[in-house]
Image (cartoon, rainbow, N blue to C red):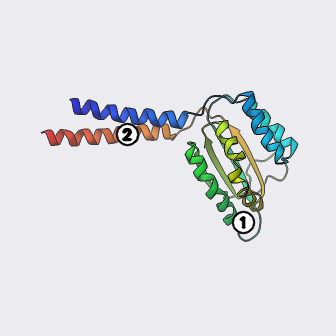
Amino acid sequence: MRRSLLLWSILAALYLGFRLWYDGGGGPLTPEEVQHYVSILEERSMDPARIENLRAFLASDTGSDFVMANFIHLQDKPGAQEELDRYMAHMYPAMFARAGHPVLAGPVVGGALDLWGIDGAERWTMVGLVRYRSRRDMIAIATDPAFRDAYQFKNSSMEKTIAIPSEPFLQLGSPRWLVAGALVTLGALLQLALGRRSA
């Protein structure tokens, strides 16, 4: 009984630690933080319209995680996919360290089947959904000086792209449930093994 209680206490502590890391985005951005990140973008001479769009997004931070829906059309040239891969080789470690990860990624297998009110959106190469723990994490990655050289690969690989943030109210297959299920399964197997040893 004591070993069983210890086992489940350890697993519960592991899950609590995971949730603190996975959901610990630090709350909404403060006005000072927003201005700090906007200043960095201004120093880099980013397009003013893009800066104002980002400022509005950061200033309306709810503190929740969000998913970025990315629609990408690669340049029609040899090596475009390899250039994008070089950019993502920088992005993945930074995202994973901050509990960000792909939710869905795959190639487009046909033209837009329902399209109205927008021009030039018939053709795309791939679609990806990426989960960010917070807006703070996203903008910290985007403004990290270590990524300034990596952005050239992103820019040179894409002909066009759309990135739209969403705070999902339904997210089936979330790691919150996957990790919980894995730990419960592990606990059940270990408890069974302990029971056999003590029998």
Quadrant of the drawing holding the N terminus: top left
Residue 109: x %, y % from top left? 66, 59
Contact check, label 2 and label 1, Cβ < 8 Å = no
Disc 2 target residue: 183
Task: Give the labeled residue for mark 1.
Answer: 80
Q: Check the image and report above or below for 185 versus 109.
A: above
Q: Residues within 10 Å of mark 1 (few under 14, many from 20)?
A: some
Q: Secondary structure at mark 2?
A: helix
150 left or right of 10?
Answer: right
Residue 111 located left or right of residue 42? left
Looking at the image, is 20 positioned above or below residue 118?
A: above
Residue flagged by tag 1: what amino acid is it?
A: Ala
- The type of residue carrying mark 2 is Leu
Q: Position of residue 165 (x, y in %)?
A: 70, 39
Residue 45 or residue 156, whichever sits in front: 45
Q: Is residue 6 visible?
A: yes
Label 2 neighbour load within 10 Å: few <14, some 14-19, many 20+ = some
Based on the displayed image, in which of its 4 quarters is residue 66 positioned?
top right
C-alpha distance separating marks 2 and 1: 41 Å
Q: Residue furthest left?
A: 199
In the image shown, does 127 or 29 lie closer to the viewer? Answer: 29
Q: Residue at x 67, y 46 (%)?
A: 141
Q: Position of residue 110 (x, y in %)?
A: 70, 58
Q: Split into 4 quadrants, where in the image is the C terminus?
A: top left
**Residue drawn at x 86%, y 46% as measured from the top left:** 47
Residue at x 76% of width, y 52% of height: 161
